[in-house]
Image (spheres, rainbow, N blue to C red):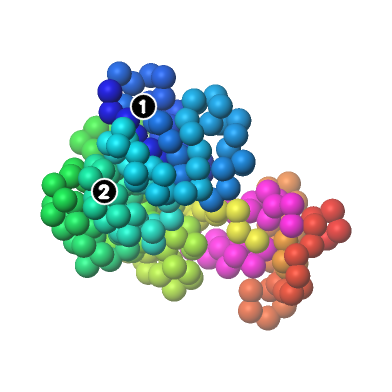
Amino acid sequence: MIQAAIFGLGRWGQNLVNAVQHKSQKVQFKSAVVQTPSKYDDFAHQKKIKVTANPQEVLDDSEIQMLVLATPHNLHVQQIQTGAKFGKHVFCEKPLALTLEEAQKAVLGCEEAKVLLGVGHDKRFWPAMQELKKISAIDLFADESCRTEDDVLTCAAGFDGINIKLTKCGGITPALRMIEHARKLNLKIMLGSMNESTIGTAAIVHLWPLVDALDADGPLLLKEDIAEGLAFDNGCIELGTRNGLGIKFWGEKRTRDII
């Protein structure tokens, strides 16, 4: 049985633990590294894992053979290189790195340490996904598989449409280029959100006329907001009339029951 430690217990980190803990005959999680261990007491008790804020405890544990990284993308390379130096095999959630140069550093570090490096794989490359597209009676949209402009072309083989999120692709300008590219490939287009405030959501809504579907309910899921200018009414969204995005920035957080 491979003893593993996971870095990061956010939504996806917990999904990874749930997928194998007490189920797999090959891997089990012994420890988790997070910034605030007390936030995960219940989950840790349920899964029987030790939670710590000190990564050195995991690196020094000779029983732990593998690290699983479900952390912010900009931390991946450093964590991979550090784990490799301590002789730990590493599985890293996608993306491996933010640039080709950084990815090469991560691979080289593992090669020099003679440890294995694995990376999460997008479904858009799966032959099964391409076959599903052929037989599906409904349209299949790429969500997590489509993050940046470079992903649009590769998604065309396995999906009928793409979901563009401004916080992932980099803003309005790259989103416009993604829309143009998708239309040339006969892909349908959806605009999605990631719990943005009114400011981020207003930017999304401005692109609505250019796409086929919209998911922009981020402000409704927030207890606090930092601006006003969007009106939600039974599935309809009305933009404000101010210049620019049509919103007013308050300069402070306000709870939604005060808005």
Q: Position of residue 98 (x, y in %)?
A: 32, 63
What's the mark number on residue 86?
Answer: 2
Q: Which residues are magenta?
A: 198-224
Say what secondary structure mark 1 lies in: strand
Other residues around mark 2 within 10 Å, as few (<14) / some (14–19) / many (≥20): some
- Front one among 142 and 17: 17
Q: Residue sitting at 38 percent across and 42 percent down?
A: 58
Q: Is residue 32 visible?
A: yes
Res. 76 image quadrant: bottom left
Q: Residue furthest right?
A: 258
Instruction: Locate residue 238, reporting x and y percent.
Output: 70, 61
Residue 209 place in picture, x, y as percent? 54, 63
Q: Is residue 199 magenta?
A: yes
Give 112 or 147, whichever is nearer the viewer. Answer: 112
Q: Secondary structure at mark 2?
A: loop
Q: Is residue 201 magenta?
A: yes
Residue 256 lies left or right of residue 80; in this view the side is right
Residue ID at (68%, 49%): 221
Q: Between 74 and 80, which is closer to the camera in this rendering?
A: 80
Quarter placement of the C terminus: bottom right
Q: Nearer the viewer, mark 1 or mark 2?
A: 2
Residue 28, labelled with which disc? 1
Q: Earlier in the sequence, mark 1 or mark 2?
A: 1
| Residue type at numbered disc 1 | Gln
Residue under the image location 50 percent in, 43 percent down: 52
